[in-house]
Amino acid sequence: MKNMESLRTQCALQGALSAANAIGGVIPVVHSTAGCAYQNYLAGGLANGGQGAGLAGGLAVPSTNIVEKHVVFGGSARLREQLKNAVKVFEGKLFLVLSGCTPNLVGDDSKAMVEEIETQGYPAAYVQASGFHGSAYTGYELAVRSLVDFASKKTASPLTTVKGLINIFGIVPGQDTFWQGELLSLSREFSAAGLILNPLFGFNQTVENWKNIPHASLNLSLSTWGSGIVEYLKEKFGTPALKRSFVPVGAEDTKQLLLDIAGKLNFDEKQINNHAEKKEQEADYFISQFAEAYFNFNFQTDFSIAGPLSQAVGISRFLAYNLGFTPKTIIITDAPQLKDEPIGDILPHIDTKVNVFFTEDGNEISGLLKKGNPGLILGSTIDRITAEEKGAAHLSISLPVSDRIVLNRGYAGYSGALNLIEDIGTVLLKRRTQK
Amino acid sequence: MPSLPSRIIAIAERRLGSIDAYYGPVQPLIDGYRDGQFFAQRIRTLSQTKGDEITVILQMLHQIKNTVTVVHGARGCAAMQNYLESYDGHGSPVFSTNLTEDNSIMGAEEVLRKTILAAVERHKPEAVFVVTTPIVAINNDDVQTVAADLGEELNIPVVPIYADGFKSKTSANGYDIAYHSIAGFLTAEKRATDKKLVNIISSDGSEEDVHKIAELVTSIGLNPNIFPRFGLLSAIRNSSNAVATIGLKPDSRVIGEFLEKERQVPYYLLEQPVGPEATSRWLGEITGKTGNKSEALEFIKSREKKKFDELVADPDTNLSGRKIYISGDIYTAIALAGLVKEFGGSVTGLSIANIDKNSVALLDENYKKNGWPFNIHIGDGQVFEQANILSRDTPDVYLGAAGQAVHAARLGIPSVNYAPMPLYGYDASIKLIRAIVRACSNRSFVEKLGSYTSVYNRSSWFGKNPNWYIKQEVG
């Protein structure tokens, strides 16, 4: 048996709820038992860099809190009543119903209730996201599809395309700790390179941004969890898709991604190269400064990492190819289906064979991290105990994160890599002073 | 072997007439529970999320040493272990059977069996708790048989805790379910009464508070036997030999009454020792109830009185003129109200998670004693109702438990979350008093928050009565 102890990922309902909470004006209406949304708040809001869950998140999430009589006699009427009242109390541009295990097992017709409130003139959509349907990443996929369908209902035909507009998928709110920072950082990088990123989640993102989805020139996926979505959009709107399995960290991978996009869009590569050159000069300037501490305090080390594939690979590539760190063990905690890129093609191999494991079982992760005896462990806050036991430096980068506050910090792109250098340098220094 | 007559315990609504929805004067509640009657059940036609039986049980089991917990359900039913493990730390391992759609249809007894075996192999626990969830309640897995078989095979207690997640509206019912199983599976027969041994039931709260309780009990010459949180299974087994069981909240009632009835250990639910006055009273009651006289007690009282007089003379620890709204479970809220009064402040409103036939007297007594003119709000969370109430009569400070304080702060009200703070004993609550004074003296952050966009339609919702969506249940 696999993946049993200390699971790091929430359920599909909770993933869909985190996605809903990350869009301005969306009021999630959970149709399930009382604790479902509350556990999402504890695990995905507080134990994820203390980000919370937005204005309509946490204890504010409308939830039908169904009880036994709804299991026996059905809970559709309870959902109808909840929706009818929620639209009067909450300021919402979209009421997104998320139905969990219990109503789905007893056969509640949540969809009909949503259609009913829509006929009354209130914007509403529905996601069937039972916890048993899978992990929070599956919930993200389900929510995105529903939101796409809702936002594109009134899209005029024929479609107009905005040159350089790119929708981005696969960076998952509530699960990927740095999701806000990654989206902000990539938006800035893309904008400076002459492209327009449509991040869809986070700061300033509302249902209006989702309505632009059909007009994009390209749909970009930066993890396997966006892969199915961009295929869906290709089928639905004919928009080209670009799929990568990891978030780019640092100059090389960021530039390569931008060039790949330019290739797909027949975009002027010169603009990309000019942008890259400027950003690389800036990064080189600071990396050169970092060399002082690096060599004075002997920062070069081997490392092990545990996190979702897109992040673990992105960070590992930067550390291996740019900072001279040696990867020992890479543990993928979101257990994705690697359809797009063979794992061997994207992982770094620097003078040693890196060990790759797929598990989110906390006990297994702890054992694997211990085995390698790395000098640096990047993982969850729970892995700090393992790092302390082994005398390794430790940085929390993946769920659960409860020893640092993460708001708009990210590791993606050019500037993100400098954040990563600062954070890793800091923990390496701390380990030195603690010895 | 289990010595309880039934596998499950009736829900709090049926046993105790527990309600979790009400806003209005306190007198109808008092009248509703008179003469053994139950106050008529209320329902919400609009509700927000809150903890449930499962969340209550998981936070409790997580801190029972040398055990493992298996949550038999979808992975989300155990999601909060990420929070528990990373913030509380060093708790007992939590496993999930991580049920799939196929399991929900075809049953998952074999998955449960394998998970328990793996958990035992890994951690060699003294006991395994199996917490059931909605999927299991619906697909009717035979958890009892799996637990019984494995208990025999592994020669350790495998304790099923039947938390369906939808049986009761009252999350505190989770304590009752858990204690029902703990009583049946983990207590032992009485050997002989130890006249110095006092059971202290620790269902929630911080480790610091538990240590403080132990210190207080020890200071009057008694030996504390603390369980389940931060305790060992041996403490549960030894509980039958204690001279008394002291509960700090009504959540201790099921285990306390079991020990009283089945093991002849008297059970006392005492008001919490929060602040100097309540702590002296608490210690006095324990010495009285256990028949142990303590010469040290008078000395302690007099020493602490001197300290208290110095504290209230200091403006940093004086609440004079402060109007305070309190939200929490009834025993904690009443204890905090006493503390506020002791330090010179006044209470302007109360939100209580739930109330039942046993706790209504405490409410009655305190309303009468303090002459509180305000309505009582009964609701676990339900921050939209609290927002409405708070918009009418803005307090100087809102005191709330985890997850609630931020919502009051978003209205521009200085707020303090008391949940992570030590509360018990003579001086622990000074931190809370200082936090209240600090919150009043620098309002810059909450004023900023209050100026931000609200999630509520203020003109529509705040114009309605806060009880607009609370209805008497029919049928």
Image: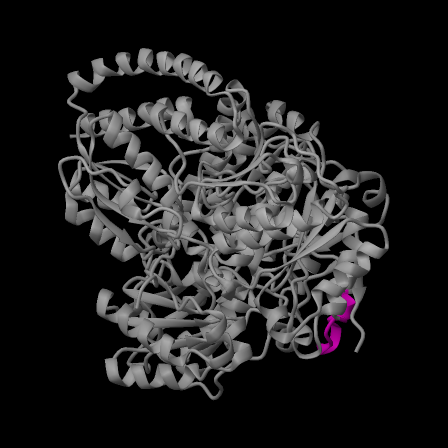
Closer to us: A38 or B292:
A38
Question: Residue lying farthest bottom?
Answer: B5
Res A161 → quadrant: top right
The x, y position of residue A158, in whole percent, is 74, 41
The image quadrant where one finds the N terminus of chain B is bottom left
Question: Does residue B288 appear in the picture of this structure?
Answer: yes
The x, y position of residue A426, in whole percent, is 29, 25
Colour approach in the figure: one colour
Closer to us: A69 or B248:
A69
The x, y position of residue B94, in whole percent, is 36, 62
**Vertical order, B94 against B184 (above or below):** above
**Vertical order, A123 against B54 (above or below):** above
The image quadrant where one finds the C terminus of chain B is bottom right
Q: Please tell me which residue is depicted at 52% across the width and 80% down the height of the picture.
A: B139
In magenta stretch: residue B33: yes
**Vertical order, B363 against A27 (above or below):** below
In magenta stretch: residue B174: no
Question: Residue lying farthest front?
Answer: A266
Res B474 → quadrant: bottom right
Question: Does residue B373 appear in the picture of this structure?
Answer: no
Left or right, residue B366 beside residue A239: right
Closer to us: A121 or B298:
A121
Closer to us: B267 or B418:
B418
Left or right, residue A303 beside residue A26: left
Q: Which residues are magenta?
A: B29-40
Q: Please tell me which residue is depicted at 59% across the width and 47% down the height of the picture.
A: A233
Q: Please tell me which residue is depicted at 41% across the width and 77% down the height of the picture.
A: B160
The x, y position of residue A20, in whole percent, is 61, 47
**Vertical order, A255 against B76 (above or below):** above
Could you tell me how many numbered marks the image carries? 0
